[in-house]
Amino acid sequence: MTQQKQFNSYKEGLDLGFLRAYCMEHGERRVMERGETLEEAGEPAQWVAFVERGCFKYMVHNDEEGKDYCTGFAFESEPLW
């Protein structure tokens, strides 16, 4: 049986079970709507989270070009940071 490579390969080998358990025990469940912002660039980060269902898209806005760019994704059971 071959092991499927993760989309976010930089997360391979990380055991974040302890962090997920902490979030589940001490955190709160939050439903994010499509297009809703979790954090803003340039502002202090306030959250650490895990995707329970669905996916999360990381976006950045380029002011010079006036365009938004997708810089990554987080999928089910992956952390947001």
Image: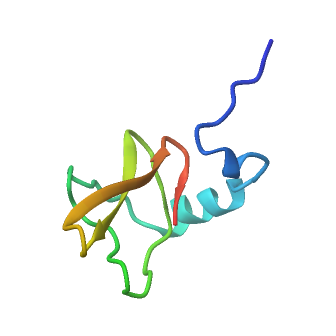
In this view of the protein, which residue sits in the foreground, 57 or 69? 69
Quarter holding the N terminus is: top right
Q: Is residue 9 left or right of residue 51?
A: right
In this view of the protein, which residue sits in the foreground, 15 or 68? 68
Query: Which residue is drawn at the image coordinates 33% and 57% (left, top)?
Result: 69
In this view of the protein, which residue sits in the foreground, 9 or 28? 9
Q: Is residue 1 above or below residue 72?
A: above
Query: Which residue is drawn at the image coordinates 55% and 49% (left, top)?
Result: 78
Question: Where is residue 21 drawn, in percent x and y?
Answer: 62, 58
Question: Where is residue 12 drawn, in percent x and y?
Answer: 73, 46
Q: Is residue 12 above or below residue 65?
A: above
Q: Is residue 2 left or right of residue 23?
A: right
Question: Where is residue 72 drawn, in percent x and y?
Answer: 46, 52
Query: Which residue is drawn at the image coordinates 22% and 62% (left, top)?
Result: 67
Query: What number of labels is visible?
Result: 0
Question: Where is residue 39 drawn, in percent x and y?
Answer: 35, 73
